[in-house]
Image: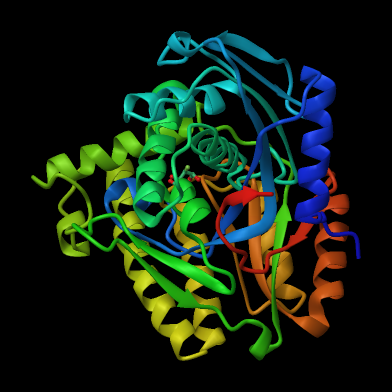
């Protein structure tokens, strides 16, 4: 079956090095590698101080970086569009646009945090599908962050990674202009192989907990279907949802929706704002319930929670689309235990928990349904929970 391959990390790092040499006529000093992600459940809850449960993908972005003797910064990519050139003092908010803002923004945010990154040349390469709701932006940010710290002589440590999560979030929100919530950077930098990461965005300390995900023992595969309806988090839909959530919290006299109950939410007068808040409050509960169901290896219950989550995003949060709804319903009809859209929405990808012996049937059924509906052919990935970002070689 034709799944998008994650690629071999050492081969991809070698390709990034070769592309760097042909772009800049010298070898890189270091290659940073950072994974994309899929979120199992907990959508649009991170910026509401809620809970999320993502895994890292085996698909990753590679950033080859070499320091310069001057303060020039050059960023290019084999795949992503036009190169960027500037200097270290021209990387901040409002100074860089397009894809390079995610990388330039990280260099700016690191310097804001006191990490003296010099002028650098950067070459980006990788296998995370772009704009597919699989966190290619955070993978880019985190790969650049780790490589930049290595060239700045800063040693890797758990404390550094927490700083890098914060720096990458600043890059995305303040420089790239995508008002996202932090889930994607956190999982990319803190993931563990074979585990999901429960992240509590309201925790004063210890916000993350590894959650073993024994899918193989249950004969289950996590199938990701990229609808190839491209979404962009800098578009207005994501920010509009965030604004509705802030309005809901303010109407309840709260600073976030985290402590809100459904009874509270029912008092909100505006129909649209009430439905947005209903999604957030019920979704946070579904994350807790999913963690319990996974611990009990009750995959039927996980499937029920996935279905409820998808319905909530389709009907109350209104971030699904015809392609996502079709991918989800077809996967279930063809034998998936559960399926839902994942990520920011308005396109992007769905996930399905599929018994191994139904995998081919599910993929074929989704492809056939898309063709019959006149949609672009989707592409599929297999998501085995992978490890966190690092420096390769
Ligand atoms: C995107 C954002 F970047 C995340 O912060 C999160 O809000 C997600 O959409 C929705 O759960 O990936």
* Vertical order, 62 against 211 (above or below): above
Q: Is residue 218 above or below residue 160?
A: below
> Quick one: quadrant of the N terminus?
bottom right
Q: Can see residue 312?
A: yes
The x, y position of residue 284, in whole percent, is 33, 63
Any part of residue 181 in sight: no
Horizontal and vertical percent position of residue 270? 24, 41
Does 368 sit left or right of 168 as displayed? right
Q: Classify residue 212 as left or right of residue 324.
A: left
Residue 180 on image: x %, y %: 41, 38
**Residue 319 in the image: above or below residue 121:** below
In which quadrant of the rendered view does residue 221 lie? Answer: bottom right
**Residue at 74 percent of width and 79 percent of height:** 335
Relative to 218, is 173 on the left or the right?
Answer: left
Residue in the foreground of this view, choosing between 129 and 266: 129
- Residue at the farthest right position: 1
Q: Nearer the viewer, residue 175 or 154?
A: 154
The residue shown at (54%, 17%) is 119
What sort of colour scheme is used for the picture?
Answer: rainbow
The total number of labels drawn is 0
Q: Position of residue 355 (x, y in %)?
A: 73, 83
180 in relation to 96, above or below:
below
């Amino acid at each position: 079956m034709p799944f998008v391959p994650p690629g071999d990390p050492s081969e991809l790092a070698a390709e990034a090095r070769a592309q760097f040499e042909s772009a800049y006529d010298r070898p890189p000093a270091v290659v940073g590698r950072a994974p994309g992600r899929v979120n199992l459940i907990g959508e649009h809850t991170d910026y509401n101080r809620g809970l999320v449960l993502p895994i890292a993908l085996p698909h990753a972005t590679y950033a080859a970086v070499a320091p310069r003797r001057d303060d020039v910064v050059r960023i290019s990519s084999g795949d992503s569009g036009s190169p960027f050139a500037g200097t270290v003092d021209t990387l901040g908010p409002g100074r860089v646009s397009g894809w390079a803002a995610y990388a330039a923004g990280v260099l700016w945010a690191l310097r804001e945090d006191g990490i003296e990154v010099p002028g650098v040349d950067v070459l980006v390469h990788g296998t995370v599908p772009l704009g597919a709701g699989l966190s290619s932006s955070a993978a880019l940010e985190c790969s650049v962050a780790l490589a930049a710290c290595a060239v700045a002589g800063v040693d890797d440590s758990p404390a550094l990674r927490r700083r890098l999560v914060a720096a990458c979030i600043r890059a995305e929100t303040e420089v790239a202009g995508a008002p996202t919530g932090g889930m994607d950077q956190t999982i990319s930098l803190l993931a563990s192989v074979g585990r999901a990461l429960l992240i509590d965005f309201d925790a004063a300390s210890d916000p993350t907990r590894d959650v073993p995900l024994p899918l193989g023992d249950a004969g289950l595969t996590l199938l990701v279907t990229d609808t190839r309806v491209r979404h962009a988090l800098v578009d207005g839909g994501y920010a509009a949802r965030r604004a509705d959530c802030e309005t809901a919290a303010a109407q309840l006299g709260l600073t976030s929706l985290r402590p809100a109950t459904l009874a509270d939410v029912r008092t909100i007068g505006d129909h649209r704002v009430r439905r947005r808040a209903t999604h957030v409050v019920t979704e946070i509960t579904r994350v807790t319930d999913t963690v319990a169901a996974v611990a009990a290896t009750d995959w039927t219950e996980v499937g029920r929670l996935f279905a409820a989550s998808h319905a909530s995003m389709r009907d109350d949060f209104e971030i699904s689309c015809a392609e996502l709804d079709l991918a989800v319903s077809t996967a279930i009809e063809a034998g998936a235990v559960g399926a839902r859209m994942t990520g920011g929405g308005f396109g992007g990808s769905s996930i399905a928990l599929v018994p191994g012996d139904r995998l081919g049937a599910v993929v074929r059924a989704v492809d056939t349904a898309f063709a019959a509906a006149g949609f672009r052919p989707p592409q599929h990935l297999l998501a085995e929970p992978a490890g966190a970002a690092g420096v390769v070689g």
